[in-house]
Image (tube, rainbow, N blue to C red):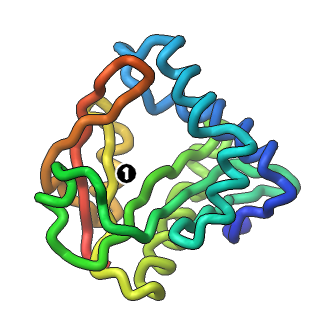
Amino acid sequence: MLIGPADPARVAELAELAARTFPLACPPSAGPADIAAFVAENLTAARFSDYLRDPDRIVLTATDGDRIVGYAMTICAAADDPDVAAVVSQRPAVELSKIYVAPQAHGTGASAALMSAVLRHAAESGAACVWLGVNQKNARAQRFYRKHGFTQVGTKTFRLGTHIEHDYVMARPV
């Protein structure tokens, strides 16, 4: 398993993985149209090209052989969500915006390796903490984050197409 910066020449593969894995983290109440709208707006090859050019974002990939099997994206900027700003008090803070691994790579250590790389990059950037939003019904992800030192510090909402989802805000010091 190799963890490293996303390759701009592989954004199509990265977008395909993102489109495949994002629905796996959505609650049962999320409709296919809302999921498709989110993917079309946020997880296309063009959007990943934008993310890779954004100096406030870091996109990492986990590759196994010649396949991308997971990715993570951080945002090194102040939270613009007032619910998050109210509960994430350590500054500077890094948002773990996305971390997904293909089902066939579950149990391989890819998720843990991506998380370790995210935390290392956050520490190297001088961040005081890393925070994330996770759907309140996604118990599996919450267990993973707790295992890596995150604790629930608040709540926020997340727009998924036309539907509003409810997330926990979790954070941990770097």
Q: Is residue 29 left or right of residue 7?
A: left
Residue depicted at 16% across the width and 43% down the height: 155
- Give coordinates of residue 150: x percent, y percent: 26, 61
Quadrant containing the C terminus is bottom left
| Residue 69 drawn above or below residue 21 | below
Quadrant containing the N terminus is bottom right
Q: Is residue 13 left or right of residue 25?
A: right
- The amino acid type, in three-letter code, at marker 1 is Phe
| Residue 24 drawn above or below residue 34 | below
| Residue 75 drawn above or below residue 159 | below
Residue 113 in sight: no
Q: Is residue 50 left or right of residue 85?
A: right
Density class for disc 1 (Cα within 10 Å; few <14, some 14-19, many ≥20) is: some
Residue depicted at 24% across the width and 55% down the height: 170
Q: Quadrant of residue 153?
A: bottom left
Residue depicted at 22% across the width and 43% down the height: 168
Residue 44 in sight: yes
Q: Could you say whether the residue bearing mark 1 is in a helix, strand or loop?
A: helix
- Give coordinates of residue 17: x percent, y percent: 69, 39
| Residue 67 drawn above or below residue 137 | below
- Residue carrying label 1: 144
Count of labels shown? 1
